Amino acid sequence: MNMKMYQGFNREQLEERMRMMENRFEQHKAQSLKLDMSRGKPSKEQLDLSDGLFKNITNFESEDGIDCRNYGVIDGLPEMKRIFAQMLEVDQDELIVGDSSSLNMMYDVIARAYNHGLMNAEPWSRLDKIKFLCPCPGYDRHFAICELFGIEMITIPMNEDGPDMDMVEALVAEDRSIKGIWCVPKYSNPTGIIYSDEVVKRLAHMRTKANDFRVFWDNAYCVHHLYEENSLLNILAECKKAGNADRVFMFASTAKISYAGAGVAAMAASRDNIRHTLGQIAIQTINPNKVNHLLHARFFKDLDGIKEHMKKHAAILRPKFETVTSILKKNLENLNIARWTTPRGGYFISLDVPEGCARKVVAKAREAGVTLTKAGATFPYGIEPEDKNIRLAPSFPTPAELASAIEIVCTCIELVALEKILLNEVNR
Ligand SMILES: Cc1ncc(COP(=O)(O)O)c(C=O)c1O
């Protein structure tokens, strides 16, 4: 926001505008709304799309004759592995299909790295300090895992094509305690950006001081297009080309394809990483939930089945995203007090308000009945020094609710921005 806020308004006009917004805010409050757009949850309509999972259950036998009701098959049902292998563009023996949550798989990788060590590496618990790079704004639950394990988080600015790679390369080359980087490479949470080929290649090729450095490649939104299909360079293939095959752990799930919280998750990596991981997982469990794998594999059949299904999700989500961006545009365009992303996929819109205003906007919106993601949540430790980013999650409310919620958010942004300007004219 380099342009002057409320360009062309004099003090009287600003005061007049403030009074107008205060009136509008009181009207919003009088509606006693209760709208929650804090988390990226699918709506009921989206979840209903997958109820076919439970049709045609005549038996529990897999294509290979595995009785899915019984113990065994630690790496997941072959037909479900086939689908994830297509989705993540890896071979089936570079893959483990687990239970319902990919976040759980990420957590477990870190817990095992602490307790037992990654392949050919000592347990992180024996080292004085562990650090992770956190491109920001990013996904709060990644940061929460780091916080729980006492991992020091280093904020990396996010560009239009991925993290600031000059900074990433410089840091990992010098510091042995930097063991990982969090990446949501496609339709990133919350900015919606897609990592460029160059960024993927640099991540794969860069020299790291730690020999057990890993890229945590959380491809949660790999098939979640709102419009055209966008591609992403295959980081495992790039790591192999660079002679760093073991550098990456990829993750995905059907949480936002079938059921959030009751879908199927998977992780992919080099064969050696997978072998090493399976050796440890085999102590933790006898098998994942193969019945759920079977239901999913029968319902979706293959990647084309998933793609067709995702078009139905897009038809529900697209108008919601467009409602948000068109209301933001209608109210705030030309005022120079907000900037927002217009993602081509994923679950979020990232909204920037003037510095020092995000927390106040979120608090004001709550006063009028709209729950937004906590300001600061998209940064390590829940603190954004500039206090300007707000994550909007349009998926769960109905379009009508969403329209009311965003109108309220716009009023709140104006109120907080006007207050800032009127209190401190110098900032204009
Ligand atoms: C980037 C990202 N990764 C992972 C998850 C959670 O995935 P799962 O339900 O498979 O644990 C989310 C959910 O919002 C997400 O945004």
Image (cartoon, helix red, strand yellow):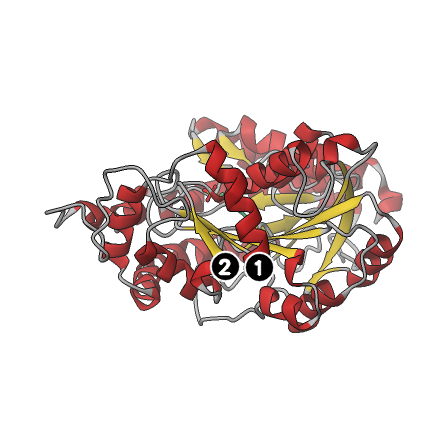
Instruction: Decide which of tag 2 and tag 1 comes sooner along the chain.
Output: 2
Residue 407 appears anywhere in the view: no
Residue 37: x, y in percent? 48, 39
Q: Are marks 2 and 1 in contact (CB under 8 Å)?
A: yes
Q: Identify residue type, mark 2.
A: Glu
Residue at which label 2 appears? 94
Disc 2: CA contacts within 10 A as few (<14), some (14-19) or many (>=20) = many
- Please give left or right for residue 16 compared with residue 86 in the image: right
SS at badge 2: helix
Q: Which mark is residue 270?
A: 1
Residue 260: x, y in percent? 38, 42
Q: Quadrant of the N terminus?
A: bottom right
Residue 106: x, y in percent? 56, 42
Q: Which mark is residue 207?
A: none
SS at badge 1: loop
Q: Identify residue type, mark 1.
A: Ser
